[in-house]
Image: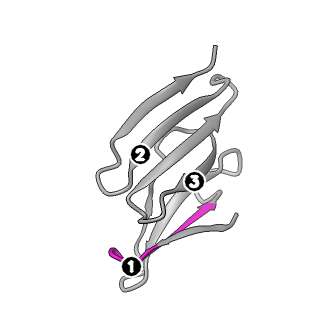
Amino acid sequence: NEIVAYNHTTQEIYFTGTKDSPLQKNLYAVSISTSKIRRITQTNATHQPTVSKDGNYTIDVYTSMTIPRNIDIINNKTLIEKRILTAS
């Protein structure tokens, strides 16, 4: 559980944590002005996110009991995910 990035435009801090389940590690964003937390990673898994320098995108490497490894690019505003790799 760590702070991953800061988006100056949206005034959000990105961090990883186990808020939804101790069996998962997800990426969240918290607004500095409202303290509202939103979940960025949507798949139930253990995520290793890398947030872009401007805070707009995340490269998300994740695994679970049923997913050997996937890599997605996530738009942090819309939460739209684009798969770039699926391990078999």
**Distance between mark 3 and mark 2 Cα atoms:** 10 Å
**Distance between mark 1 and mark 3 Cα atoms:** 18 Å
- Which of pointers 1 and 2 lies earlier in the amino acid sequence? 1
Q: In percent of the image, x 64 and y 60: which residue is there?
A: 17
Badge 3: few (under 14), some or many (20 or more) residues near its Cα, within 10 Å? some
Farthest bottom residue in view: 33
Q: Are marks 1 and 3 in contact (CB under 8 Å)?
A: no
- Which of pointers 1 and 3 lies earlier in the amino acid sequence? 1
Q: Which residues are magenta?
A: 7-16
**Distance between mark 1 and mark 2 Cα atoms:** 18 Å
Location of residue 82 with respect to 55 vertically, above or below: above
Count of numbered labels shown in the rendering = 3
The residue at which mark 3 appears reads as 50
The residue at which mark 2 appears reads as 74
Q: In percent of the image, x 64 and y 28: which residue is there?
A: 69
Location of residue 3 with respect to 28 vertically, above or below: below
Query: Is residue 83 rendered magenta in the image?
Result: no
Residue 11 circle label: 1
Give residue 19's quadrant in the image. Answer: bottom right
Of residues 25 and 56, the one drawn nearer to the viewer in this rendering: 56
Percent position of residue 62, x then y: 62, 37
**In which quadrant will I find the C terminus?**
top right
Q: In percent of the image, x 65 and y 22: which residue is there?
A: 66
> Left or right: 51 with respect to 77?
right
Amino acid type for the residue under numbered disc 2 = Ile
Q: Are marks 3 and 2 in contact (CB under 8 Å)?
A: no
Of residues 8 and 31, the one drawn nearer to the viewer in this rendering: 8
